[in-house]
Image (cartoon, grey):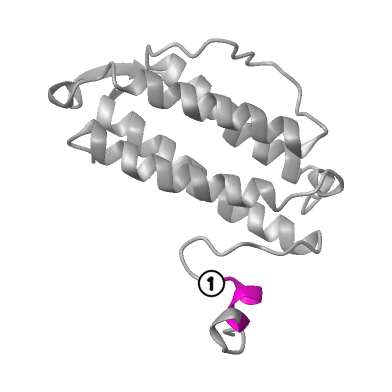
Amino acid sequence: MYSSIEDFKKDWLLESRATLSIFNSLTDDSLQQKVYDEGRTLGTLAWHVTQTVAEMINAAGLIIENFEPDAPTPLLVSEIIAKYEYFSGKFLEKIIEWKDEELMEELKMYGETWKKTDVLKSLIFHQIHHRGQMTVLMRQAGLKVPGIYGPSKEEWQNFGMPPQE
């Protein structure tokens, strides 16, 4: 739970950088990677993470312009990154409209009652959840996975250590 917008913004900056680290490790060809025939592709997951930033904030009443809910998944990583950076930046501009003392206020979200602080927490957790899914698909696509909360398999050698099992 967040008790201040500044605390949230610090977490958002860290987590959005982590998301961009994952996105920057993708290739255009890897966007088609999926676990099973009916599953989401790596590109669809990246686009879902991107779109959800604007979609959820718009649902909470902080309107981010140029959001097209039905926009198709881009075929180029650069387009996903550009839109994610745009939505993330606009979100940081808009979030200051919420004051610390309002974070416990309730609003209607997806047919439920959420506190504003829950909206912020959900945006963070949502990215973390889908980044985890994306790293599995990245491995299947033969991509190197960047370390987010610690070294990835490939990064242990930077510390002069063998990869952890």
Q: Quadrant of the N terminus?
A: top left
Residue 101 lies in the magenta-colored region: no
What range of the chain is rendered magenta? 152-157
Residue 69 at x, y percent in the picture: 63, 16
Residue 109 at x, y percent in the picture: 38, 20
Marker count (numbered): 1
Up-down relation of residue 70 to residue 46 (above or below) = above
Q: Please tell me which residue is depicted at 62% across the width and 33% down the height of the picture.
A: 48
Residue 153 lies in the magenta-colored region: yes
Q: Please tell me which residue is depicted at 32% across the width and 43% down the height of the picture.
A: 10
In the image: residue 30, left or right of residue 69: right
Q: Quadrant of residue 6?
A: top left
Most frequent secondary structure within the magenta stretch: helix
Residue holding disc 1: 151
Taking depth in this image into account, of 149 and 135 the one nearest to the observer is: 149
Q: Secondary structure at mark 1?
A: loop
Q: Quadrant of the C terminus?
A: bottom right
Q: Please tell me which residue is depicted at 37% across the width and 11% down the height of the picture.
A: 61
Residue 21 at x, y percent in the picture: 59, 51
Q: Please tell me which residue is depicted at 39% across the width and 14% down the height of the picture.
A: 62
Up-down relation of residue 8 to residue 147 (above or below) = above
Taking depth in this image into account, of 129 and 3 the one nearest to the observer is: 3
Up-down relation of residue 110 to residue 40 (above or below) = above
